[in-house]
């Protein structure tokens, strides 16, 4: 039995060679603290913590008139002293396992460019899920492709490709988060979505700045090498704008922008494993953000006013003066945004300088909302058709009904999110009543039902067979 147990322990040790080990006291990794000492119950302690422990015990005993050497020399004379189980103490709880970085040759590349699709293919894949936003899809496809070319670059020359971090500007519900989430799924790379509103300087109340990297590490299943080539999307970045007319310390605005500079540019940061904040009992690993692609997105409300002021500043008097209301109803006004407008909004120049790719997403109109209902691969209408198909019922929407839904969604001014809310409301009674009657074979949603002046057209299975 003892030989089998030893063999199993040897096999487990060999299987765990690719896993980072941590000191149970200081929570530093073996690559940082040096070779760890294995104690009973598989507790690992670094040499510095072990020495500190001996020094502390020695000082305490010398103050009481005892010496540590005399204690171990005469241990058999103290029958009351017994070995105790260190595994029962909470400080020695098992830490999350983090995979080590594999040792790579200089000639090998982390990313195989043969597996990364070209920009036009990335855009074709995005077209299946995202309606409209042609400029944004083209910009994000080129930026991602160039980023992975930069990561895979192994040529030793004087030309170093800089990071192509991105800033997306668009109204709520225009598809910023959906675009990034779809992109990460298509490219099969780890993605972390962080909310800028929860970030504060040094984690005063919310999360600290390094927590965005800990989310990426968790998304990569604690594979450090894979996480260092992932994508981090920081949403609601406009909430970090500098506060105006304040004499207090701006711990959730300008201070967070300053703290994000080192992450955006690329540096080594200490990242907590299995937690969003640093503390004495959380193990830390060193993550290099040099090859992490950062995408920031925000709605930037009322920035249209700043853009109008800049555009009207050029010629306000004379024969060639522009009318003040010239840009009031311009649907492409957001596309004219500049770095000057963003700086006036409250973003600091150093932060904007680390986001070289800036593009906008246009607001959704009635035609785009109608297409969003039916055209994407996982369109909302297709989802409801699949749900009713499980009850062997066919669902159809008239063209006028789709237009009416899009018109009502446009009035809510919440973008594509309004479509789901409206359909949940309209389909509630239908989804509740149809399972009661097995004779129903087809349901047609009409414009009158959407406008509240009629009911949906229901066909029984016999009628459907006759009409078919």
Image (cartoon, grey):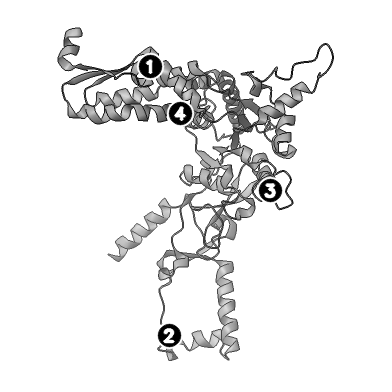
Q: What residue is pinned by disc 1?
A: 401
Which secondary structure, mark 3?
Answer: helix
Indicate the secondary structure of the residue bearing disc 1.
Answer: helix
Q: Which residue is mark 2?
A: 81
Using the image, tell me which numbered label, if any, was put on residue 418.
4
> Mark 3 or mark 1, which is nearer to you?
1
- Distance between mark 2 and mark 4 Cα atoms: 70 Å
What's the mark number on residue 255? Answer: 3
Nearest-to-viewer mark from 2 and 3: 3
Residue 445 drawn at (x, y percent): 32, 18
For marks 2 and 3 on the same chain, the one whose residue lies earlier in the sequence:
2
Rendered location of residue 233, percent (x, y): 56, 37
Q: Is residue 259 above or below residue 324?
A: below
Q: Residue at x 66, y 51 (%)?
A: 251
Q: Is residue 150 above or below residue 34?
A: above
Q: Residues within 10 Å of mark 3 (few under 14, many from 20)?
A: some
3D distance between C-alphas at marks 2 and 1: 83 Å
Q: Is residue 142 left or right of residue 159?
A: left
Q: Nearer the viewer, residue 343 or 276?
A: 343
Label 2–label 4 contact, CB within 8 A:
no
**Callout 4 secondary element:** helix
């Amino acid at each position: 039995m003892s030989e089998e147990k030893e063999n199993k322990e040897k096999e487990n040790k060999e299987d765990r060679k690719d896993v980072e080990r941590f000191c149970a006291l200081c929570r530093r990794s073996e690559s940082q603290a040096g070779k760890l000492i294995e104690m009973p119950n598989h507790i690992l302690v670094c040499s510095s913590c072990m020495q500190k422990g001996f020094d502390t015990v020695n000082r305490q005993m010398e103050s009481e008139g005892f010496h540590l050497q005399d204690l171990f020399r005469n241990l058999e004379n103290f029958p009351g002293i017994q070995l105790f189980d260190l595994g029962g103490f909470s400080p020695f709880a098992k830490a999350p396992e983090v995979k080590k970085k594999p040792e790579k040759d200089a000639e090998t590349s982390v990313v195989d460019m043969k597996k990364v699709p070209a920009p036009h293919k990335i855009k074709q894949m995005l077209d299946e899920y995202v309606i409209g936003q042609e400029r944004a899809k083209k910009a994000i496809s080129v930026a991602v492709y160039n980023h992975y070319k930069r990561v895979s670059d192994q040529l030793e020359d004087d030309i170093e490709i800089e990071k192509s971090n991105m800033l997306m500007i668009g109204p709520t519900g225009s598809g910023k988060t959906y675009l990034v989430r779809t992109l990460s799924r298509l490219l099969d790379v780890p993605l972390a979505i962080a909310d800028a509103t929860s970030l504060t300087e040094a984690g005063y109340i919310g999360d600290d700045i390094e927590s965005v990297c800990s989310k990426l590490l968790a998304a990569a299943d604690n594979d450090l090498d894979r996480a260092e080539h992932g994508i981090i999307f920081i949403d609601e970045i406009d909430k970090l704008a500098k506060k105006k007319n304040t004499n207090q310390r701006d711990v959730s605005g300008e201070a967070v922008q300053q703290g994000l500079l080192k992450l955006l540019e690329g540096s080594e940061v200490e990242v907590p494993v299995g937690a969003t904040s640093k503390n004495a009992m959380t193990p830390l690993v060193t993550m290099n953000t040099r090859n992490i692609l950062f995408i920031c997105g925000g709605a930037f409300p009322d920035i249209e006013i700043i853009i109008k002021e800049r555009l009207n500043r050029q010629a306000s008097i004379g024969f060639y003066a522009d009318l003040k209301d010239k840009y009031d109803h311009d649907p492409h006004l957001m596309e004219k945004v500049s770095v000057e407008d963003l700086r006036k909004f409250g973003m600091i120049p150093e932060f904007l300088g680390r986001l070289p790719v800036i593009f906008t997403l246009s607001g959704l109109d009635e035609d785009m909302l109608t297409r969003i209902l039916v055209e994407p691969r996982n369109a909302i209408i297709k989802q409801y058709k699949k749900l009713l198909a499980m009850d062997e019922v066919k669902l159809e929407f008239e063209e006028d009904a789709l237009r009416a839904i899009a018109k009502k969604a446009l009035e809510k001014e919440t973008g594509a999110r309004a479509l789901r809310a409206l359909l949940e409301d309209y389909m509630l009674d239908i989804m509740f009543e149809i399972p009661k009657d097995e004779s129903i074979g087809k349901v047609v949603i009409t414009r009158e039902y959407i406008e509240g002046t009629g009911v949906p057209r229901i066909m029984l299975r016999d009628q459907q067979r006759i009409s078919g």
